[in-house]
Amino acid sequence: MKKNRSKPASSADIRIPLVVCVIIGIFLLAAYTIVVSFTALPPSLFGIILTVVYIYTAIFTFLGVRNRLRKIALEEERAAAYNTEIYQMFRETIDLPYAIVSAEGRVTIINRALEEILGRQATGEALEEICGTSAEEIIKASEPDGQLSLDIQSGKIEYANPGEGMIVGIRRRRFMARGYPMMVSGTRCYMIVFTEITALVELREKMKRENIVVAFIMLDNLEELAQYVRVSYRSAANEIDTILKNWAASMKGLLREYDRNRYLLIITREMLDECIKNRFEILDSIRNVRLGDDSMSVTVSMGISTGTGPLSERENEAMLALDLALQRGGDQVVIQHGNETEFFGGRSKGMQKRTRVRSRVNAAVLCNRISESSNVLVMGHKNPDFDSIGACVGIARLCIFCGVPVKIVIDEKSDNFRIIAERLLRNSEYSDMFTDPLSGLDLVKPDTLLVICDANNFNIIEAPDIADSVDRIAIIDHHRQTEQFDFEPLVNYIDPAASSTCELVAEILEQSLPAGTILKDEANAMYAGLMLDTKFFTKDTATRTFAAALYLQREGAKSEVVRQFFEEDISDYLAEAKFSSDIELYRGNIAITRSVGTGNTEQGRTAASKAADKLLTIRQVDAAFALVSVNDEIRISARSSGKINVQLILEKLKGGGHFNAAAAQVKGTMEYAYQLLTEAIDEYLDNA
C-alpha cells in the first residue's frame, strides 16, 4: 500500500517545483526585455545579474516546495498506515459480527466474530446462504430515517438512526440484522451488522407458549334436546362433563363449571395451538354424544381470548367470543386474537329453540329504545328482498305504535320494493314513509335510533354512511354473524335458527302490539318474507315459523295475495334459463352453474338464487352454487340441503348468510370467482 501511494508523491516532488521555476524564469525574461529596451544598461551585464538571481531563486524554490510536499506525503502515508492498523484491529477484535456485502449480494468481507459463528470463511458467498435473506430486504426492514453513508475516499461520515431491522437465523441462533448502505470509492455496497438475540427470542416464545388463555364453554343445545327425546338430562350432562374434564386434564388446564352447562377453561397458548392444529377435535367428541332413538347430537360452543392484557379484559373478550359463536348457530369455536377473529366448526345446523323468552326480552328492550329516540331510521340490505322489506315494514309499524317518527331507508328503484310499495302507498301513513340513503342522512340527530333488519354485515346494508353517523343502533337478523362489532348495539337480536327476519319481527309485534294493530298490507309484506326464505314453507320451518305465519294471517295476511308478489315475466324465465347450459358436478356432490347474466343486477341475483334452488333437486347434490356476472363483479348464490354449511364456505369470499343459504360478491372475472369458490369448497371439505 505504501508503494502505491509513494509514486504519486515522488512525481509531485518534481513536477510542482519545476512549474514554479518556469514561472519565475518567464517573469525574469520579461523584466530583462523591458530594462534592455528602455534603459542604457549594458545587456550582457544585466543578463549575468538576472541569470545569477534566477539560479539562486530556482534552487531555493525547488528545494522548499519539494520538501513541503514530501512532508505532506509522509503524513498521508503515516495516516493510511494508522487507518489500516485500526481497521485490522477493529475487524479482528470487535465482538459484534458484521459483513460487507456487494451490490450483487455477495459477501466481500466478514470479521472474525461472524466467521467464528459461521465456522468458515464465507467471503464470496451470497448473503442468503448465510442468513436466509438478502441485503436489500434487511435494508428495507431496518427502515432508517436516514442512512449511514460512509465514503472512504473523502473521509466523510454521516450517522443516522436505523430501524428495528430483521430477525434472521444463523446455525440455530437468532440475530437482529440491521443494514446500512455504503459508498466505497464510488461503488455501492452494504454493511450488515448482526446482534444476537437468541435468548430474547427464546424468552418471548416461552412467554407466548405460557400465555394464559381464557375460554368460556357452553353446551348450546342440551336443554332443547332433552325436551325432544325421552332421556335423562343429567346422565347426558355428566357424560359431556367427563369428556370436557378429560380434555382439560390432557392439556394441563383448569376447568370449572360456573353455571348449568357453562364452563370456564384456563389453558396455555401452547395447548391452544395444539387444539388449532387438530381443528378442535373436542367438537367431534362431544358431537358423538347422541340422545334418544333418533341419535340427536349434543353440541358445544366456545369463546376464547388470546389477549395479553389484564385477565379481566381477556374474560370479557372470551365472553363476547362465546356470544358470537352462539349467534352464528353454535357448535363452533370463536377465537379472538386482538382485532382478528378465527372460527372453527359450525358444521351443524342450529336447533330452533322453543322458548320465546329471548324474543319477549328483545321486544321489551326495543320498545324502550324506540320510545327514548327522537326519530327512528329503518333499513335492510342492498338489493332488498321481501324478507328485508317486510321486516323493515314491521319495525316501522312498531315505531308508529310507540308514537316516534320513523322513515324506511331503501332503494326505491328496486323491483321488489315497487311490488310491496304499490299496496302500502295506498295507506296515508306510508305516503311519506320511504326515503333514499342521501336524504336519510339529513334526518340523523344525536338521539336517532337506526334499526338494521335482515343484515349484520355493514358492507351490504342499504346506507353505510348513515350507520357511520349514528351512535344508537339496533340489529335484528337471522343470518350468522360474521365478525364482532366495533361498537355495542342497543339491541343485538341475531338468531340463525329462525327461518327469516320477518319471523323474528312478527314475534316482536305479537308480544308488543294489541291485536288488529297491523295493516293488512303490512301483514302481507311480512308474510311474503316468510314465504320467500322458507321456499313457501318447505324449508327451515319449525313451530315458531308457523306460529308467526298464523299471527300474520290473523292480522289479515292472505297467501293468495302474497303469491301474486312472486309472479314473474318472460325476461325472468330467460335469465334463469341461461344457467341451464353450464352445470358442473364438483367433487361428486356439489353442483356449480354459471351465467353471463342479462345486465340487470336484481334480475341476475334473483335468477341465480332460483338456479341454485333448482340444482338442489338433483339426486345426490348436497350443495349448489350459482355464479352470475353483474357489471364488473360476480354474484354467487349458494343453497344447501342441510349437510353442508354454505355460509362457512362463502365466508372465505367475504360473503355471509346462514347454514342453508348464503351469498357473496367477488370483484373480477368469472374464472377468478370460480377459482376462489372451488378453493373455499376444497378447504371446507378437506377439513371436514
Image (cartoon, rainbow, N blue to C red):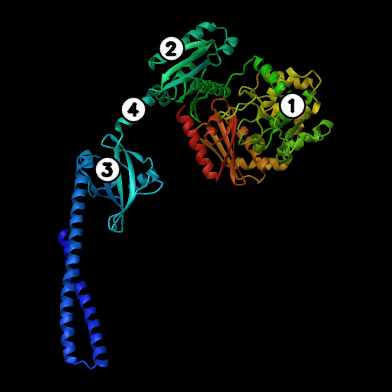
Q: What amino acid is labelled 2 in the image?
A: Lys
> Is residue 565 shown above or below 370?
below
Q: What amino acid is labelled 1 in the image?
A: Gly
Residue 203 has which mark? 4
- Disc 2 packing (10 Å; few <14; some 14–19; many ≥20): some
Q: Is residue 383 left or right of residue 16?
A: right
Q: Give the camera-side residue of 197 and 590.
A: 197
Mark 4 or mark 2: name the one nearer the start of the chain: 4
Mark 2 or mark 3: name the one nearer the start of the chain: 3
Q: Residue drawn 53% across and 12% down?
A: 261
- Disc 4 packing (10 Å; few <14; some 14–19; many ≥20): few
The Cα–Cα distance between marks 2 and 3, rounded to whole angstroms, is 48 Å
Identify residue for label 2.
Answer: 245
Evaluate if marks 4 and 3 touch, with contact meaning CB atoms under 8 Å apart: no
> Is residue 604 shown above or below 238?
below
Q: What amino acid is labelled 3 in the image?
A: Ile
Evaluate if marks 2 and 3 touch, with contact meaning CB atoms under 8 Å apart: no
Q: Does the rendering let one see residue 568?
A: no
The Cα–Cα distance between marks 4 and 3, rounded to whole angstroms, is 24 Å
Identify residue for label 3.
Answer: 130
